Image (cartoon, rainbow, N blue to C red):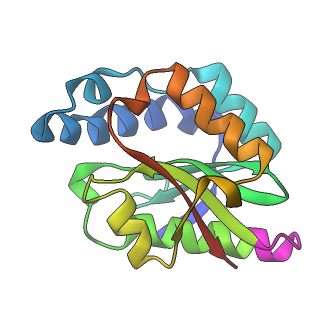
Amino acid sequence: MQIREARPTDLPVLQDVERAAGRCFRDIGMPEIADDEPPALDDLARYQRAGRAWVAAADDDPGRPVAYLLADPVDGNLHVEQVSVHPDHARRGVGRALIEHAAGVARARGLPALTLTTFAEVPWNAPYYARCGFTILDEAAAGPELRAVRAGEAAHGLDRWPRVCMRRPV
């Protein structure tokens, strides 16, 4: 698996990865998440230009992403905004490799931690991230920018299912 910065030509493929990864939510009774549109090309391009979008490409086709991670600076940490793995490449350590890459980027930039928000009860969300070294933050431990991220998610309707903030030192 090769991890590299996203290229402009990758962006439509990232939308396809997101759509495919989202389908798994339908199987657990979350069709609204499954049907949610992937990030717009303009949004993906903003991450790509800022150097905060990474892709994992399969060894047999290093030009084609099979997973991606987007990150934002939030409260002095590197916040994992999105990580998605195409289901055809799931359970192979691809997501974990992207998270480890983001941790390396955070460390190189002198940032103390990775943060993220996720569904508390979805097996490939909070329980998975806990196995990757993240711990749940209580509301008081979340900084103002992370609380703003959560407020935006709530406004988008994501609080219909339990969500948590998580943090992992790098």
Q: Which of these two is toward me, 26 or 126?
A: 126
Q: Is residue 9 left or right of residue 71?
A: left
Q: Quadrant of residue 158?
A: top left
Identify the image quadrant of the N terminus.
bottom left
Q: Position of residue 60 (x, y in %)?
A: 35, 64
Numbered range of the magenta stretch: 106-112
Q: Residue at left 65%, top 43%?
A: 7
Asked which quadrant contains residue 147, the reply is top right
Above or below — where is 64 with respect to 3? Answer: above
Query: Vertical placement of 99 versus 131: above or below?
Result: above
On the image, the x and y values in percent for residue 5 come to: 67, 54
Image position of 92 with respect to 54: above or below: below
On screen, residue 127 versus residue 31, left or right, reads right
**Residue 62 seen in the current view:** yes
Q: Quadrant of the C terminus?
A: bottom right
Q: Compared to 94, does 71 lie above or below?
A: above
Q: Is residue 60 visible?
A: no
- Residue placed most toward the observer, 46 or 133: 133
**x, y percent for residue 101:** 62, 71
Count how many numbered circles sit on residues in the image.
Answer: 0
- Comparing 69 with 61, the one in front is 69
**9 left or right, relative to 56:** right
